[in-house]
Image (tube, rainbow, N blue to C red):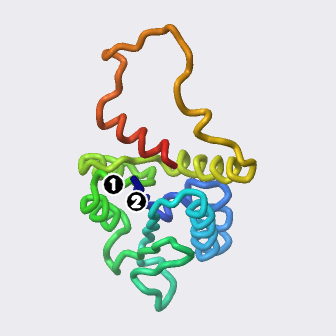
C-alpha cells in the first residue's frame, strides 16, 4: 500500500539545518533544495509526495498547483494558510496520509482525522538515512524484524491500534 506524504514545506525547511541556511540566502533556494531532496527520495520509495507552501510567499505569477520531478507542489491561496490546506488534504485522505510537520496545531488536527504524523526533523533523518542506505546498497529490511529473545511481551505492553498504524506508515519511509 502506497502512502501519501503531505509536507508542511516551510516548517521542514526551517527545522532543517541544511535547508534553513539556503532559505536565509534566498527563499526560492530553500524550496528548490527541498523539492530536489524529495525527488531523489521518490526515486527510492515510490510514495506520492505533496509539499504545501504558504501562498503569500510564493513566486510571482506562480500557479496554485505545480508538479516538478514527480513532486506535487501546492501553494495556499492568498489569505489562506498552508496549515489549513494540509488539514483539508489530510481530512480527505485520512488513513492513507502521513503528514510531516512539527506544528502541534497541525499534528493534533490531522491525528484526530486518522492521519499519521512525523516531525520535520525525524522525517529529514529518514530522508538522509534512505539516501545513504540506497547509495551503500544496504538491505534495510534485514534490520527490521524478529530479534531472538526469551522476554515475554504480553498485551499490557502492546501499542494502541493508532500507534501501530502510525509506526507501520513510518516504517515504509
Mark 1 burial class by Cα count in 10 Å: few <14, some 14-19, many 20+: some
Q: Which residue is mark 1?
A: 96
- The one nearer the camera, 154 or 65, is 154
Asked whether the residues under the numbered discs 2 and 1 touch, taking CB atoms below 8 Å apart as contact, a structural biologist would say: yes
Q: Position of residue 114 (x, y in %)?
A: 27, 48
> Dot 2 lies on which element?
strand
Left or right of 61 in this view: 83: left
Residue 109 x %, y %: 28, 51
Relative to 74, say whether 119 is above or below: above
Mark 2 and mark 1: span between their CA atoms?
6 Å
Q: Position of residue 72 (x, y in %)?
A: 46, 73
For label 1, the SS is: helix
For disc 2, the marked residue is: 4
- Neighbour tally class for label 2: few under 14, some 14-19, many 20 plus, Cα within 10 Å: many
Residue drawn at (60%, 47%), measured in percent from left and top?
125
Residue 29 figure quarter: bottom right
Amino acid at each position: 500500500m502506497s502512502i501519501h506524504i503531505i509536507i508542511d514545506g516551510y516548517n521542514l525547511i526551517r527545522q532543517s539545518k541544511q535547508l534553513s541556511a539556503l532559505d536565509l540566502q534566498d527563499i526560492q533556494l530553500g524550496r528548490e533544495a527541498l523539492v530536489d531532496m524529495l525527488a531523489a527520495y521518490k526515486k527510492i520509495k515510490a510514495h506520492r509526495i505533496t509539499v504545501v507552501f504558504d501562498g503569500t510567499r510564493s513566486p510571482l505569477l506562480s500557479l496554485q498547483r505545480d508538479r516538478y520531478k514527480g513532486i506535487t507542489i501546492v501553494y495556499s491561496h492568498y489569505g489562506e494558510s498552508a496549515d489549513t490546506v494540509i488539514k483539508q488534504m489530510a481530512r480527505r485522505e485520512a488513513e492513507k496520509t502521513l503528514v510531516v510537520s512539527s506544528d502541534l496545531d497541525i499534528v493534533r488536527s490531522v491525528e484526530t482525522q486518522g492521519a499519521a504524523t512525523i516531525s520535520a526533523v525525524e522525517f529529514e533523518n529518514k530522508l538522509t538515512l534512505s539516501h545513504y542506505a540506497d547509495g551503500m546498497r544496504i538491505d534495510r529490511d534485514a534490520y527490521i524484524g524478529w530479534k531472538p529473545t526469551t522476554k515475554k511481551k504480553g498485551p499490557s505492553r502492546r501499542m494502541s491500534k493508532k500507534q501501530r498504524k502510525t509506526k507501520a506508515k513510518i516504517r515504509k519511509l
